[in-house]
Image (spheres, grey):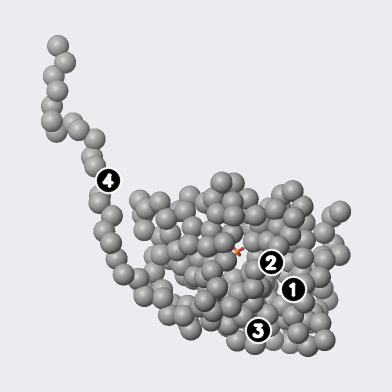
């Protein structure tokens, strides 16, 4: 006969508690944060169209931080958020950018809410469509599931935005690292313009 002992019940997950998280819209600081990382320019070399301009930039200005990501990712939660803080600058005609990615889980979207600075969010679907959303304070960009997304700082100040997604969305960097984005954000006659990426495979 089976004996049922009450102390053999599976342990319950600890209850998640509500919390107010301060986000500084100018610096992008998140308090409290659960994690952060920085990307230096040197790790982004292959993303830019003009590698000669890239090498000249690094030789002249050193290996500066290009962007930083600060996260609030509570363990056991289904959602998370954080900030991305992008420095201003250009490599040749191309503005500073993030790596860009699809989500590993193809049914997971995201929201980017710009706090300060100005930029553009480049997006493309797997079926050949490209879109862009202007990143300005007060604009929330809706990123549907299975659209690649890359942020570009087209301004002269930091670009700070809040991102929010499901905690299990994950990142798939492979396709954008190999093929690039369909569009580039470049300076043309003193202002930002989007042009077709000449290296994107047809
Ligand atoms: C998460 C997300 C952002 C980016 C961040 C850096 O899904 O979209 O948190 O990860 O802006 O961009 P990547 O990851 O493309 O270098
Ligand atoms: Zn994302």
How many tags in the picture?
A: 4
Real-space CA distance between mark 4 and mark 3, rounded to the nearest whole angstrom: 45 Å
Nearer the N terminus, badge 1 or badge 3?
3
Nearer the N terminus, badge 4 or badge 3?
4
The local secondary structure at tag 2 comes to strand
> Which residue in the structure is indicated by mark 4?
13
Which image quadrant for residue 61? bottom right
Indicate which disc residue 103 carries. none
Nearer the N terminus, badge 1 or badge 2?
2
Tag nearer the camera, 1 or 2: 2
Which image quadrant for residue 87? bottom right
Real-space CA distance between mark 4 and mark 2, rounded to the nearest whole angstrom: 41 Å
Real-space CA distance between mark 1 and mark 4, rounded to the nearest whole angstrom: 46 Å
Q: Is residue 31 left or right of residue 60?
A: left
The local secondary structure at tag 1 comes to strand
Nearer the N terminus, badge 3 or badge 2?
2
Marks 1,2: beta carbons within 8 A: yes
Real-space CA distance between mark 3 and mark 2, rounded to the nearest whole angstrom: 16 Å
Marks 4,2: beta carbons within 8 A: no
Q: Residues within 10 Å of mark 4 (few under 14, many from 20)?
A: few
Residue labelled 1 has its Cβ within 8 Å of some atom of ligand 1: no
Real-space CA distance between mark 1 and mark 3, rounded to the nearest whole angstrom: 11 Å
> Which residue in the structure is indicated by mark 1?
185
Please give the name of the residue rendered at 68% of the width and 80% of the height, measured from the top-left corner. 154
């Amino acid at each position: 006969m089976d004996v049922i002992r009450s102390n053999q019940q599976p342990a319950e997950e600890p209850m998640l508690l509500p919390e107010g998280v301060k986000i500084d819209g100018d610096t992008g600081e998140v308090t409290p944060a659960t994690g952060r990382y920085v990307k230096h320019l040197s790790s982004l070399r292959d993303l830019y169209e003009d590698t000669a301009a890239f090498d000249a930039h690094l030789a002249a200005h050193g290996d500066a931080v290009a962007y930083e990501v600060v996260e609030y990712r509570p363990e056991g939660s289904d959602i998370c958020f954080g900030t991305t803080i992008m420095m201003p600058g250009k490599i040749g005609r191309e503005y500073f950018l993030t790596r860009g990615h699809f989500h590993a889980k193809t049914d997971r979207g995201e929201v980017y809410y710009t706090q300060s600075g100005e930029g553009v969010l480049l997006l493309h679907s797997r079926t050949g469509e490209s879109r862009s959303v202007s990143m300005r304070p007060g604009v929330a960009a809706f990123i549907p599931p299975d659209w690649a997304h890359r942020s570009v700082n087209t301004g002269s100040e930091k670009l700070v935005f809040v991102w929010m997604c499901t905690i299990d969305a994950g990142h798939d960097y492979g396709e954008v690292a190999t093929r690039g984005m369909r569009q580039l954000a470049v300076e043309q006659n003193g202002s930002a313009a989007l042009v077709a990426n000449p290296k994107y495979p047809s």
